Amino acid sequence: MTVKKFDSKYPEVVLDTTLGPITLRLNSEKAPLTVGNFLNYADRGHYNGTIVHEVHKNFIALLGGYTENLKERTGDFPIRNEAANGLENKRYTIAMARLPHSIDSATTHFFINLADNANLNHSGKDADKFGFCVFGEVIAGREIVDQLNTISTTAKQDFPALPTATIAVQNVKRIK
């Protein structure tokens, strides 16, 4: 993967969802590899046509890797986890998802924190304490994020909290 250069330390992107637009400000100063990874997928159109595939109320909304028919869009290769960057998993921040027992396993999946989740912050070197890398925040469309926290979910296949109504990411585009 080639990491793209940034015009700004804080690039902005809009997630056009079926619920409305969500604007993210990314932090390439604190999480340069993670922001580069995210923008690489966004610029290639990887996130277009994906869905919010899990919503755990008052915790997180997970997206970035599955289509409406629950087929996974695989990523290129995992990136190094930058969770020790000082950013915290607070409400309205975004972070990379990873495998629970593998620190450096994040590829395309990311989540929006629906609450303050201090338990997801970096607190040690072991996998269970390393944390999840925060790399940005929602700066507009917070009412859409709040809507995510109220939707109905069901367990289906390998998805323990799949929204009962499809919430699609139609397009992701850089605005800054």
Image (cartoon, rainbow, N blue to C red):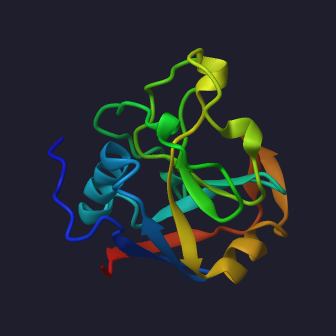
From the viewer's perspective, is 122 left or right of 79?
A: right
Can you give x and y, in whole percent of width and height, for residue 167 in the image? 63, 69
| Picture residue at 44% right of the left edge, 32% below the top | 81
| Picture residue at 28% right of the left edge, 37% below the top | 76
Q: Quadrant of residue 82?
A: top left
From the viewer's perspective, is 147 left or right of 6?
A: right
Can you give x and y, in whole percent of width and height, for residue 155 in the image? 80, 45
Residue positioned most to the front:
86
Question: Nearest the camera: 41 or 174?
Answer: 174
The answer to whether residue 100 is seen in the rendering is: no
Can you give x and y, in whole percent of width and height, for residue 164 in the image? 77, 63
Q: Quadrant of residue 49?
A: bottom left
From the viewer's perspective, is 109 left or right of 162?
A: left
The answer to whether residue 132 is seen in the rendering is: yes
Question: Nearest the camera: 81 or 123?
Answer: 123
Can you give x and y, in whole percent of width and height, for residue 119 in the image? 75, 37
The image shows residue 29, relative to residue 17, as above or below, that is: above
How many numbered circles does the render carry? 0
| Picture residue at 34% right of the left edge, 75% below the top | 173
- Image quarter hosting the N terminus: top left
The image shows residue 141, relative to residue 45, as above or below, that is: below
Question: Nearest the camera: 150 or 142?
Answer: 142
| Picture residue at 30% right of the left edge, 79% below the top | 176
Question: Nearest the camera: 20 or 71?
Answer: 20
